[in-house]
Image (tube, rainbow, N blue to C red):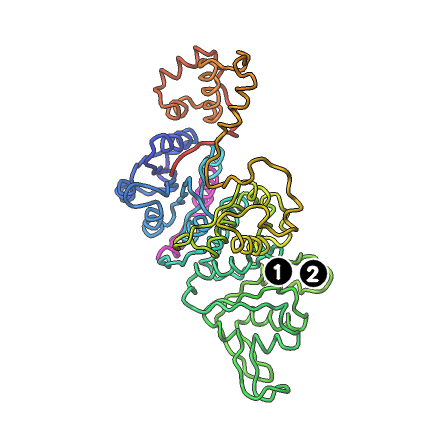
Amino acid sequence: MSIEIQALVIDDEPAIRGFVSDVLREDGWQVAEAETAEHAFDLLRERHWSLVFCDVLLGGADGVAVLRRFVSEQPHAKVVLMTGHGSAAGALDATAFGAYDYLLKPFGINEVLNIAGDVRRQLETKKAQRRTAADTHEDDRAAPAYTSDIDLVGRSAAFLEVMKLVGRVAPTNLPVLITGESGTGKEVVARAIHRRSARASEPFVAVNCGALPSELIESELFGHVRGSFTGAERDRRGLWEEADGGTVFLDEITETTLSFQVKLLRALQEGEIRRVGSNRTVQLDVRVIAATNRDVEEEVRTGRFRQDLLYRLNAVTINLPALRERRADIPALARRFAERVRPAASSDAPVSFTRETLRILENYAWPGNIRELENAVVRAAALCDHTVRPEDLPERILRTREPAPHEDAPASHQETRADADGEHAAAGATGAAEAEWTTLAEVEARYVRRVLEHTHGNKQAAARLLGVDRKTLQRMIQRHNITTHNHDHSAHHTGRG
């Protein structure tokens, strides 16, 4: 077997490490395992690795340290970080640092096989093309120290996929077009891209094209010379020059006029601008990130936006999901916004939310997206007595409310069903039907079947997850007459990391 399909699995939990290793072995990979980062560093020097699965939380050095070492010493290796405590900023940083992918636990067999298959195909393509040393050109760039992305909150699948793309495009100099509804956080993402680029220490200049009068936008961006128009009493540098070496963020780019778009296209193509009223061009090094809440293709079809400018701007397009498409992130976002009113580290008690309040927030359509959520939460947190209840929310949000019991119980405390259970017991639980109860044997049989379905019939992996040896598992299968065959991969594998 070729050395090019060597895989390394790093996790301090034997069950997870064994699960991923078994899946890879069955797919034809030669696999080695390490339970610590230090052990992985020793193996790093022993051979060339093509694929690495590494847990983020390890004893000693963490998974990010492993990622950095591989990026530095074996840049061809595809490193996949695994975590049970994922976040949008974590996905962004992982890919910006050079991770091939970022897997959020629980994950299943299909996710592992899909990644392994993609890497295998890439290796075969490179081998056919007689891979050259040019593949290592990007391995010497040191990862910058980033400030916290306080607004990049969430771990929904839709948002994490966006953050992975952001992390991959950030280190490049490619222009980026960010699309999405108003209030989805386009400028927040643009700033995150800038902070993770080699331009991070240079200016980030944000321009709202929709807020500038059409007759002034050229002067604001490119500057002007004295006497070029009424009121131009002196030469003035434009925002484009202010951003030299850094990034210009052009928000609402589709609000610009066609005549200005021609000049913007030249600035992008030639890397130079000309101040209003001047015949002299100025060479500048500026990365452009543009954003719009409109359908750009429709704007092109109707003649309101130049197609050649669109081609120049959208080398990479990032579409931000609306908040209604990532409802699972609403509680975390709400808590983050509440902390701005009453920081958790302050002497004042932090703000909590009742379960009913969070349910209302999750059910609301949020036409204004994150911006509307922030305004609603900040208002409620400022008015409440440390706990945000439904009545603290704006009226327009309460219109979606449905009756729910125990709405005053703070969501930060675990609810107990003792009272409800007591009522049912008093009503006649003494005569509960025996048919409602399940024997231990039935429970065991059901659980073993689920584990086997999860491992796609792989008995070795199933035994690891159950914490038994293979012979014990075989006896359990025979005892319960369980048929083992290839199952679908819809089950998920849980883990701590």
Residue placed at 64% from the left, 70% from the top? 261
Give x and y (percent) for residue 236.
53, 82
Q: Residues within 10 Å of mark 2 (few under 14, many from 20)?
A: some
**Does residue 467 sit above or below 125 in this rendering?**
above
Label pair 1/2, CB-CB below 8 angstroms? yes
Query: What's the residue type where badge 2 is placed?
Result: Glu
- Which of the image's four quarters has the N terminus? top left
Query: What's the residue type where badge 1 is placed?
Result: Thr
Q: Is mark 1 on a helix, strand or loop?
A: strand
**Extreme-right residue of the structure:** 302
Find disc 2 in the rendering and name its residue.
299
Find disc 1 in the rendering and name its residue.
292
Residue placed at 58% from the left, 35% from the top? 405
Give x and y (percent) for residue 8.
35, 38
**Does residue 49 sit above or below 109 in this rendering?**
below
Kindly report the distance in space between the C-alpha atoms of the residues bearing marks 1 and 2.
11 Å
Instruction: Find the magenta span and give its range.
Output: 117-140
Label number found at residue 386: none
Q: Closer to us: mark 1 or mark 2? A: 1
